[in-house]
Image (tube, coloured by chain):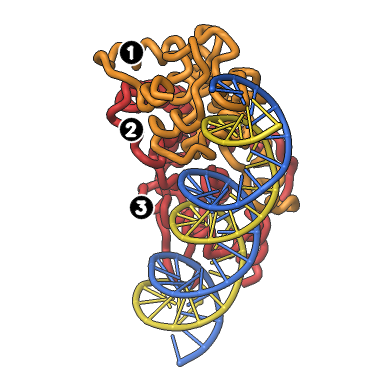
Chain colours: A red, B orange, C yellow, D blue
Amino acid sequence: MSSRVAVAVHVLAILTWRRSEPVSSQQIARSVNTHPVVVRRIVGALRRAGLVEVQPGAAGGARLARDPAEITLLEVYRSVESSDDLFALHAQPPCQDCGVGANIQASLVEVFGEAQAAMEAVLARVTMQDVWRSVFARMGHRGACGAEVRRRA
Amino acid sequence: MSSRVAVAVHVLAILTWRRSEPVSSQQIARSVNTHPVVVRRIVGALRRAGLVEVQPGAAGGARLARDPAEITLLEVYRSVESSDDLFALHAQPPCQDCGVGANIQASLVEVFGEAQAAMEAVLARVTMQDVWRSVFARMGHRGACGAEVRRRA
DNA sequence: GGGATTCGCAACTATCCTGGTTACAGATAA
DNA sequence: TTATCTGTAACCAGGATAGTTGCGAATCCC
C-alpha cells in the first residue's frame, strides 16, 4: 500500500498542533521530508473530503476544518486511498465453465469484505485527537520544522 | 494489493476439490484463466510454506499437503504476499528535528499494527474447508476446467 | 532407453502505481 | 504592485505485477 495515509495523518497532526494559523505546503513538506507538491496532492484530497480548509495566496495554507476529535483515521484512509478494496480479485475473470472458477469470487468477496471491515473498524475508532495525544506524549518541548519561517516573514 | 491471495485461494480450492490426484499447473491455469507459469509461481510459494506438495514429471502436479480444515487464509495470505505490512510509512524518514516528524511514525506503527491484526484475525479463523464449503454451496453439479484432459491422456 | 509430460527458474516485456520534480496560471495579503 | 501560496498538468524514475518464452531437470509410460 502507498504511504499516502501515513503522510495524511502526519499532515493532520501538524494542523492539529498549529490550529491557530494556516500552514503552508512548504512548511509541511519540510516536516514530512518531501516535495511541497506531494503535500498539496494529499491536502487536496483531504480538502475534497471536507477535513481541511485551504486558503490560497500569501500567508495562506491549510487548516483543520473540524475538531480533531471528530476526524477518524477511517475518514483519512478513505480520503486519500484510491481503491476502496483492500484485496484484489483475479486480474482476469476466472473460467466460468468451471465449478470453482464460476463461484470462487463470490466466496472471496465475502471473506475479504469481512477482513476489510475489521480493519476499518479499528481505524474508525481512532481520531486525530488520539493520534495527536500519542505524538505529544512522545514529544518533548520542540519546535515544528519551519515554525520560525512564518515568524521571520 | 495484488491478486495473488485470490489466485492462491482459488488454487487451493481446486486442490481441495480434487484431493485424490495431483493437478497440473496447466489445468489450474485454465480455471484461473491465466498463464501456467503464473500458477507455478503461486504454487511455489504455497509449497515453500508447506501448504501443498508438488510432484514433477509426467502425471505430476500439485496436491494439498494438509487437511483443508487446517489451512487458514492467514497462512495463505502470508505465503504469497511479499510484504508483511498492510500500511506503508513515509517513503523518506520524516524530519527528526520536528516534534511531529520525530514521533509520528511510532504512533502510526501502533495504530496500523492494530488495524492489521484485526484484519488478520478474520483471515485466521477462515479455513480452506470453509471456503470450499462456500464455493460448493454455490456450485451446481459441474466439472472442473480440464478435468477431462487428464482422463483423455 | 526414448519420448512425452511436467515442474522450476531465469529472463524479458508491457502496464500500472507511486513519489518526486518542474512549470505555470490564478488567488491573496501586505 | 509584488511576493507568496495554491492547484494542476506534465513528465520522469523506480518498483511491482501479470503475462510470456525458453530451457534444464525430473518423472512416467511404452
- The answer to which of marks 3 and 2 sits earlier in the sequence is 3
Horizontal relation, residue A17 to residue A47: left or right: right
- Chain ID for label 3? A
Closest to the observer, B49 or B126:
B49
Task: Give the farthest residue toward the left.
Answer: B140
Residue B47 visible in rendering: yes
Which quadrant holds residue A54?
bottom left
The N terminus of chain A: image quadrant? top right
User: Are the residues under badges 3 and 2 in a single subunit?
Assistant: yes
Q: Quadrant of residue A146?
A: bottom right
Q: Circle 1 sits on which residue?
A: B136
Q: What chain is tagged by disc 1?
A: B
Quadrant for the C terminus of chain A, please. Answer: bottom right
x 37%, y 10%: residue: B133
Point out residue C26 in the picture as x, y percentages from the top left corner: 34, 77
Do the residues under discs 2 and 1 have CB atoms within 8 angstroms?
no
Please tell me the numbered disc located at residue A48.
3
Q: Secondary structure at mark 1?
A: helix
- Measuring 28% from the left and 18% from the top, which residue is drawn there? B142
Chain of the residue displaying label 2? A
- Between disc 3 and disc 2, the foreground one is 2
Front: mark 1 or 3: 1
Pointer 2 local density, CA inside 10 Å: few below 14, some 14–19, many at least 20 = some
Judging from the image, what secondary structure is the residue with disc 2 in? Answer: loop
* Mark 3 residue type: Arg
Q: Position of residue D15 (x, y in %)?
A: 63, 51
Q: Amino acid at mark 2?
A: Cys
Report which residue position mark 2 lands on: A95
Residue sitting nearer the eye, C22 or B19: B19
